[in-house]
Image: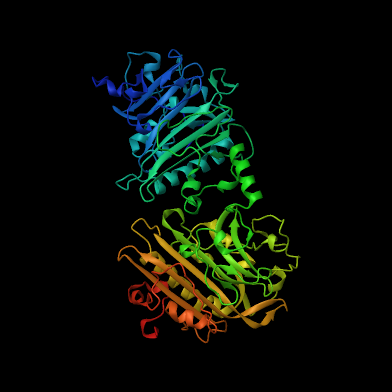
Amino acid sequence: MMTSLKTWCLLSLSVVLLLSITPTVTKVVQLMSDCKGFLLDERIPEIPGILVDGKIQDQNRYKIICQTFNDKKRFVTLYDITNMIPVFSAYKYKGENKKKIKHSWMMEPQLEEPEDDENMQDCISDNYNYQAKNRDYENEADYDRGHLFPRSFAYSEEDKHSTFTLTNIVPQAKNFNQVSWVKMEKCLGCILLRFCKNSNNLPEGYVVTGAQPGTGKLKERVNIPSVLWSAFCCYNNGRNRWIANSFWGNNVQASPDNDIHTSPLQDPIGNQKYEFFPGSQCPVDKTADQTIRQITHNCPCPPWCVMMTSLKMWCLLSLCVLLSIAPTLSEVLQSMTQCKGFLLGEKSPEVPDILEKGEIKHKHRYRAICQTYHGVRKFVTLYDTKNKIPVLSAQGQKGEDLTMFGRLSHSVSTDRLFSILQLEDSKSDKNMKDCNIHAVYNNQASDSDYKDVIKYNKGHLFPSSYASADNDKISMFTLTNSVPQVVSFNSGSWAKMETCVNCVLEQHCSDNNNAFPEAYLLTGAQPGTEKLNNRVIIPSVLWSAFCCYNQTNRKWLASAFWANNVEDKSPDVYVATRTLQQLYDKLSTGNKTFSAFPGGQNCPLKETVAQFYPQMNQNCHCQPPHQVP
């Protein structure tokens, strides 16, 4: 992370002796190939007008620094001795080290005297001709010392110390550094740690971070960059694919919400086009989130869809919206399978007289909603616009690219409720929107329907407790995912069932990396005869089913649950654990069969997960073994 400008350069207590070492650790070198280990496949970035076909265009101005601390190479920097800022620093990410260190600011002695020590040294002079000095940054109100290689990405304590050389620093606008850029670094650090794994399943990624010179100067010496950028590429062993993208932002004293732009590697940054990892397997036409979907569920990243992309990407998105091709925004669809990723085998459930063989029977009444919050798909719902309650909501994931389900994580407090405007007007915005508390919607429940109601909660079908990230949790608070549910039932036996299922998913449907190889959940409601506010049907029964893959035993697991929407008679009431076949028998009508997972031929129909309950923690609130049918 970037540091404040108030830190003074400390006087070194001892001078490091010049050691006779091999040329591979020489600090100022002639070729990038003389400083190995920090570029992906040792391929040299292409920087227009500066570094072309692996060759520096002006060797008198641009110097390659093999950044060395305590006789060990740490990273590589291309430095501009005219502007006195780095062009870029490149480094190999190997994992995180959260330990804080006391640091002193350092400089590169060989930029001043080629025969000087090869190790970076503490700043002890104000007479540097070819690099920034500490006094350039002192008493500066508007700019921080901005790291290109941030200490937060360094693997060891010595690596952290090595980032505090002024040859790795640029003047960075304070609020851009301390707000927007820090958020980007946290997002990128999380992606590198959790999604960048080599063949040994260890964190590994390559990052190049740089700056575009501006027109202003600090203390009439040091160029103030107009743009900062960072690009990464890494291999994901779990998904057997490469992921990459770039981030950049204008280095200005803007608002705290100054945008960080994200884009595929091939897109220009500012007014320049780079090749960060030429000749590699890094995808250049996709961002990391497009390669491994929903990275933001696990990392504190801004919503990817609202971050700036290239004109080419915006045109493509607009075309897809116009043509309704593979919708990636929340919208009312013609079928549930158009909302990809949430149904086992991409096959719709079978619901007699409502949803049969993938076709919605009465499309004017029942609507498929691809539920989306901040441009990211969260789950899919089949909604009954007449009864103003969902028929069912479905969530599923396969592999590391979909990680909605969470570890019994923290709750989120929100007073927000969302509606789907497209249920009212097909031309409206496709994302869920905050409910107008004064509005009465024609085709869905309104906030006023639940106002001053004591007996019933807004009962989630897909519960917020199953989601891991705050945005996922908040997205559950759409009224198209809610039904009137008796208060004691909702907070009592039904809540215990949800907690138990989440425990099963965590303990028996996840792998050693806490990722879910494959898991699917379906929850629905059977309409009753009474109405809330004379508008919203009160369900008579709620039901839920899941099917997931147990990687340890290499088998599929499944269970089903249902209960009447009535008061719990006592705190000791539990929702019974049933088989899928028992649920199918209950919800089938005449010769029409209900099926939660018609695409899941491997889901066991006559087994449950109750066998695991005796080993479960009591906080999982699973049904006591003696009560299991």
Q: Quadrant of the C terminus?
A: bottom left
Classify residue 381 by image quadrant: bottom right
Question: What is the total number of numbered labels drawn onto the structure image?
Answer: 0
- Relative to residue 364, is residue 521 drawn left or right? left
Q: Is residue 451 visible?
A: no
The picture places residue 616, in percent across and down from the top left corner, at: 36, 72
* Residue placed most toward the observer, 225 or 370: 370
Residue 611 against residue 46 in the figure, above or below: below
The picture places residue 480, in percent across and down from the top left corner, at: 63, 67
- Relative to residue 312, is residue 161 drawn left or right? left
The picture places residue 474, in percent across and down from the top left corner, at: 58, 60
* Residue placed most toward the observer, 295 or 361: 361
Image point (47%, 43%), residue name? 188
Classify residue 456 by image quadrant: bottom right
- Relative to residue 262, is residue 421 drawn left or right? right
Residue 600 against residue 256 in the figure, above or below: below
- Relative to residue 29, is residue 52 drawn left or right? right
Classify residue 479 by image quadrant: bottom right
* Residue placed most toward the observer, 246 or 351: 351
Residue 298 against residue 461 in the figure, above or below: above
* Residue placed most toward the observer, 93 or 413: 93
The color scheme shown is rainbow
Image point (55%, 31%), residue name? 269
Q: Is residue 156 visible?
A: yes
Image point (42%, 35%), residue name? 207
Residue 586 against residue 265 in the figure, above or below: below
